[in-house]
Every structure is written in C-alpha cells, then in structure tokens.
Amino acid sequence: MDQPRGMYFEDFEIGKVLVTPARTITSTDIVNFACLSGDFNEVHTNCEYCKSTQFGEPIAHGPLIYAIAGGLTYASGINDGTLLALLEITNWRIVTPVKHGDTIRVYATVTATRASSKPDRGSVTLQRSIRNQNDVEVQQMTATLLYRRRP
C-alpha cells in the first residue's frame, strides 16, 4: 500500500496554520450548484433581480463555498489517506458574499487535539477562515475531524 500523503493526528500542533491552494469561483460554479442543490433562489440565479439587491449581481451559495473549501483542503494534501471522518462543524458564519471572479483559499488553525480511546485515531479541531483574494474573510467555522494515528 502506498504511504498516505496526508497529515496524521500526531502531525497537528496547536497553533499551526495550514493554508490551502486558491481557487476562483465562476458563474458556472454558482449555476451548477443551483442545479445540484435545487436552490434556484434569485439572489444566486437572476442577474436582473440581483441588480435591485445590495450585491448588484448573483452571489455564491454559502454551502457552495463550504464545499469548495473542502475540495481545497483535499487538494492541499492535508487529508489524503489519513482523514477518517468529519465529526462536527460549529459556529459556521457567512461573513461576506462571494461573487463570480472571487478567489478563495482556506486558513485552518489547529486549536485542539484529543487522542481517542481507540489507539489508531484522534480528533483535531481547526478554526477555519475562508478568505478571498483581498484577504477578506468570507466564511468562518470550527471543524472537528477524526484522523489516523501513525501506524
């Protein structure tokens, strides 16, 4: 079996900041997520309606940004072959809208680790900050995940 490239429980140090690659959000992303989720709310899909809102144009769905952040975390290699489960998301807050053309990345600060009663795993708590190209936070949350321990 190949050696996983992801981080093991023991690799997470309190205070360590993990940074993902960046990705630009497109109109296609927004439309595809509307199709996938069935959420065709006009604030996401109707350019003319959005001209009458404070945003002026369609904005990305909050869960779309959350999902892309998950993909960016995977792309970073942090979770590849070592993540066992997402245990909890708390304090999820959408701070500012994301629009077509915005580029996001995730900054995840390790805030806690806890060994499990099972010797092959442990939980890691991360304060996640999703930020745009101007380093403005667009979403924040606390995520607790279960990782493999080193064999």
Image: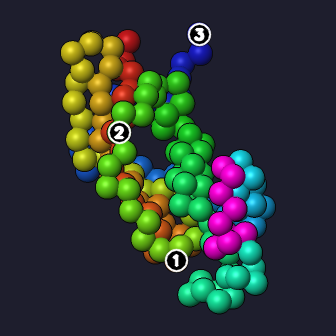
Sequence-earlier tag: 3 or 1: 3
Specify whether residue 121 is painted magenta.
no
CA separation in Å, label 1 and label 2: 29 Å
Report the span colored magenta: 37-45
Q: Residue at x 36, y 18 (%)?
A: 150
Label 3, secondary structure: give it.
loop
Q: Nearer the viewer, residue 9 or 51?
A: 51
Quadrant for residue 58, please give it: bottom right
Residue 22 seen in the current view? no
Q: Residue at x 56, y 40 (%)?
A: 74
Q: Badge 1: few (under 14), some or many (20 or more) residues near its Cα, within 10 Å?
A: few
Taking 7 as reference, is 13 left or right?
left
The percent position of residue 70, horizontal first and vertical second, equals: 54, 45
Q: Which residue is mark 2?
A: 88
| Amino acid type of the residue tagged 3 in the rendering | Met
Pointers 3 and 1 in contact (C-beta within 8 Å): no
**Mark toward the start of the polypeptide (1 vs 2):** 2
Q: Residue 56 location, x and y as percent?
A: 65, 86
Give the labeled residue for mark 1: 134
Above or below 148: residue 111: below
Which quarter of the picture shows residue 59? bottom right
> Is 71 on the left-hand or right-hand side of 119?
right
- Disc 1 is placed on an element classified as loop
Amino acid type of the residue that numbered disc 1 sits on in the rendered structure: Asn
Q: Nearer the viewer, mark 1 or mark 2?
A: 2
> In which quadrant will I find the C terminus?
top left
Image point (31%, 36%), residue name: 124
Up the image or down, 80 lies above or below 71; here it is above
Residue 1 — which label?
Answer: 3
